């Protein structure tokens, strides 16, 4: 608290919240090879995202002919936050792929 000659006072508050942090799980291990793997392509449906994933899919299949791809098209920019009605569909899709490439089409 601070007092000046006018009698006004103010209190400075910390912006840090008291929270019980969730323990970090870390990153998933990298795949040794993409041959024979199923790669998920996550499209956030911004203007360039589908174009980026078309090229990504073509290059993956050229380099790894035995890999498969699976596309999940989000109706919005954030599947988990803005599409709660598709959460189960998204989780099922994630369980069926070995890795995910997400496009941000800005």
Image: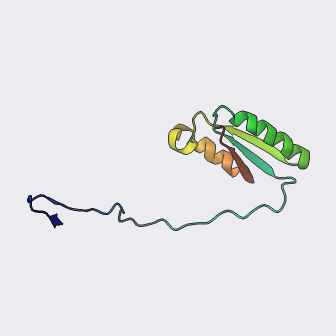
Q: Where is residue 85 in the image (x, y as percent from the top left)?
A: 53, 37
Q: Which of 36 and 59 is in front in this view?
A: 59
The quadrant of the image that shows the N terminus is: bottom left
**Image location of residue 17, percent across then percent down:** 35, 62
Q: Quadrant of residue 98?
A: bottom right
Q: Please name the residue shown 72% across and 34% down the image.
A: 50
**Pick the front one: 14 or 42:** 14
Residue 65 in view of the camera = no
Residue at 21% x, 62% y: name it: 11
Q: Quadrant of residue 6?
A: bottom left
| Outermost residue, front side | 5
* The furthest residue to the top: 47
Residue 4 left/right relative to 88: left
- The way the protein has been coloured in the rendering is rainbow
Q: How many badges with numbers are in the image?
A: 0
Relative to 39, 76 lies left or right: left
Name above or below for residue 17 compared with residue 105: below
Q: At 17% from the left edge and 65% from the top edge, which residue is drawn?
A: 2
Q: Position of residue 81 (x, y in %)?
A: 51, 43
| Left or right: 90 in relation to 1 | right
Tell me the residue at 64%/34% (across/down). Answer: 45
Closer to the camera in the image, 6 or 64:
6
Specify whether residue 91 is in view.
Answer: yes
- In the image, residue 77 above or below residue 17: above
Q: In this view, does 95 lie to the left or right of 25?
A: right
User: Residue 101: x, y in percent?
Assistant: 72, 48
Q: In which quarter of the image is the C terminus?
A: top right
């Amino acid at each position: 608290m601070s007092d000046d000659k006018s009698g006004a006072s103010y209190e400075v508050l910390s912006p840090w919240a008291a929270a019980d942090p969730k323990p970090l799980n870390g990153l998933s291990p990298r795949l040794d090879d993409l041959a024979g793997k199923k790669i998920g392509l996550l499209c956030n449906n911004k203007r360039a995202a589908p174009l980026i994933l078309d090229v990504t899919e073509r290059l993956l299949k050229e380099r790894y002919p035995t890999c498969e791809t699976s596309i999940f098209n989000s109706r919005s920019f954030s599947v988990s936050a803005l599409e709660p009605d598709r959460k189960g569909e998204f989780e099922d899709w994630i369980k069926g792929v070995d890795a995910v490439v997400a496009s941000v089409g800005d």
